[in-house]
Amino acid sequence: MKKRKFYVVWEGFAPGIYDSWDECLRQVKGYPGAKYRSYSSQTEATMAFRGDTDSEMYALRTIASGMPVEAVAEPASKSGKDNVMFGGQYLAKPAAGLAVDAACAGNPGVMEYRGVDLATGKEVFHFGPVKDGTNNIGEFLALVHALALCKQKGWGTVVIYTDSRTAMSWVRNGKAKTTLRQGPDNSDWYGMISRAENWLAANLKRNTVKKWQTEVWGEVPADFGRK
């Protein structure tokens, strides 16, 4: 029986603890200066990554759900007003970057999405509202819009934040796995989905995308406030 291993990624597209080599490889392949290592036990991996059992269990629960583990933030000092204790670590609320989010009234329903500059709180882009969309599609298009904008503007170091694991998965796989069909109410914008997929296929080098930790920092700043 093959012995189970755990993989720690300190420097990569999404630092964290992984229980499969394939997932680990996705985070380090093509990442300049990637730092990673395998461990024979869960405890060793946790101690190497953060030295915190709660953080490890969070990572493993995420893996078990079929989603990757994203870095939430760099450990910060205890003095900042936006620093929050989570999983035994002080995590700083990001002060810079680009946040994206979507809203949809119904499923399908009226959809829109936008991007917000974390440093200033100003809206950077806004699409919609349009008819016959879904929230997942909006989150996906918002993320690709942000990635394309960063490339166009030369903002290669800007980190993009989203609260949607589904959108991150779709972007990572280069495919919007939606069951929504094109119809008379969405024909004017539906082609954006395939254009976004084509952009992802043609632009493999992209900005870092991280999960906005809503349970720690509150709603993502691009949220439309309609929950």
Image (cartoon, rainbow, N blue to C red):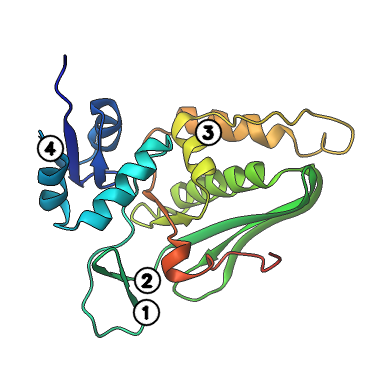
Cα distance between the residues tagged 4 and 1: 34 Å
Q: Which residue is mark 1?
A: 82
Image disc number at residue 93: 2
- Chain-order first, disc 1 or disc 2: 1
Q: Measuring 53% from the left and 49% from the top, which residue is drawn there?
A: 164
Residue furthest to the front in view is 1
Labels 4, 1: front one: 4
Where's the N terminus, which quadrant? top left
Is 213 rendered above or below residue 144? Answer: below
* Amino acid type, mark 2: Lys
Residue furthest to the top in view is 1
Q: Which residue is mark 3?
A: 199
Cα distance between the residues tagged 1 and 2: 6 Å
Is 159 rendered above or below residue 219? Answer: above
* Amino acid type, mark 3: Trp
Q: Is residue 114 left or right of residue 92?
A: right
Residue 7 image offset from top left, x and y in percent: 18, 36
Q: Which residue is mark 4?
A: 41
